[in-house]
Image (spheres, rainbow, N blue to C red):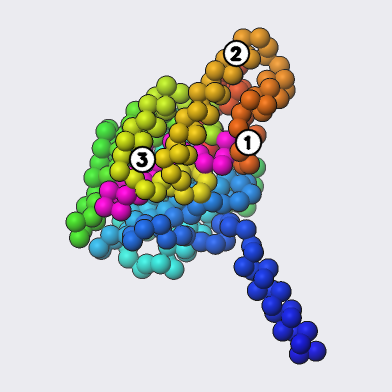
Amino acid sequence: MKKLAILGFAFLLLFLSHRPANAAMGLQKISDSVYAYADTKAASPQNSFGANAGIIIGQDFIVAVDSLISAHEAQRFIKDIRKISKKPIRFLINTHYHLDHSLGNSEFAKLGAVIISQENDKENMQKAGAGMLQYARQSGLTDKDLQGTKITYPTLTFKDRLTLDLGNNKKVEILYLGPAHTSGSAVVYVPQEKVLFTGDLLFTAFHPFLGEADIAGWVKALNQLQTMEVDKFIPGHGPVSTKKDLADLQSYLLLFDRKAKELTAKSHDLNFIVAEMKKALPHRPQLDRLIAQNIQMKYLPKGKQSQAQAK
Ligand SMILES: [Zn+2]
């Protein structure tokens, strides 16, 4: 009996140690002062479509990057932050306005955080307004999932660059590289630790969302990121990445754009186009539903149905 119990315990340990990486694993240490979610498996509306988020811990306060898809998800994030540090969360940066990165804003505002975004994406968020909650419901979130979720706009905006002083000679640079994933997507750079949060300028192992993309601008922004002193890129979705992943996404974007234009010039049959796109595109395990959404929004006539799309 005792032996069996020990055996059972051993199996339990084995099971626990082989659990796939997922949201339940909490924030991972990326460098001295940076922690982030990364490599979430089984992306779903309830886990913010696998969106990453993270923190940079300064001398006296914490800077958070992105707030996930709902008040509930933001509470999970804040709970995980509190396991690492009790310092006040003074700033929240929205890398861009998409719902899986900004609908948790209100929970950070409650803690007194100043919410920062590039000026174009504050405007995009204001234009989308309540439509963002409607779109969240269409994307599969229930009223229960969205309980307590209130749209909360950035209170501090910038045009090209904003620097936060973290003390101890450490700083955070928020940089705008031009229109790319959205017209106001920004990246968050911690130069002393060679870490950069890309927001959705980088999707690794996920298909990217291109519904509002400026492909030429995005390719240019990825080139700029290649020249920066960075060892670890925290993508908007996917595992901690390298410059090779930037190059892979760049090739993906160019291929997608060329193929989508070719195919939509011949046919407007969405099923046919998506099937052909899947043959041409590299395999990415997560969010392949975005291939159809991208074609509909960006390449077929009458696209651009909503400005408040996910991802
Ligand atoms: Zn996005």
Q: Which residue is mark 2?
A: 262
Viewer-side residue, 214 vs 126: 214
Position of residue 294 measured from the top left corner of the image (x, y, whole percent)? 58, 26
Please determine whether, in this image, residue 202 is positioned above or below residue 3: above
Q: Residue furthest bottom?
A: 2
Q: Which residue is mark 3?
A: 187
Q: In this view of the protein, can residue 246 be seen by the observer? A: yes
User: Is 72 contained in the magenta span?
Assistant: no
- Name the residue tied to disc 1: 283
User: Which span of residues is magenta-colored?
Assistant: 186-207
Magenta stretch, main secondary structure class:
strand
For residue 122, which numbered disc appears in the image?
none
Q: Identify the amino acid type marked 1.
A: His
- Is residue 18 rendered to the left or right of residue 77? right
Q: Nearer the viewer, mark 2 or mark 1?
A: 1
User: Circle 1 sits in a helix, a strand or a loop, which is it?
Assistant: loop
* Amino acid tagged 2: Glu
Q: Secondary structure at mark 3?
A: strand
Relative side of 8 to 55, left or right: right
Residue drawn at x 50%, y 23% is: 254
Residue type at mark 3? Answer: Val
- Mark 2 or 3: the one toward you: 2
Q: Position of residue 140 (x, y in %)?
A: 65, 42
In the depicted structure, whether residue 200 falls above or below residue 296: below
Query: Mark 2–mark 1 contact, CB under 8 Å?
Result: no
| Observer able to see residue 69 | no
* Image position, residue 216 (x, y; %): 42, 21
Q: Is residue 261 left or right of residue 160?
A: right
Q: Can you tell which quarter of the image residue 187 is in?
A: top left
Please tell me which residue is depicted at 69% across the width and 77% down the height of the picture.
10
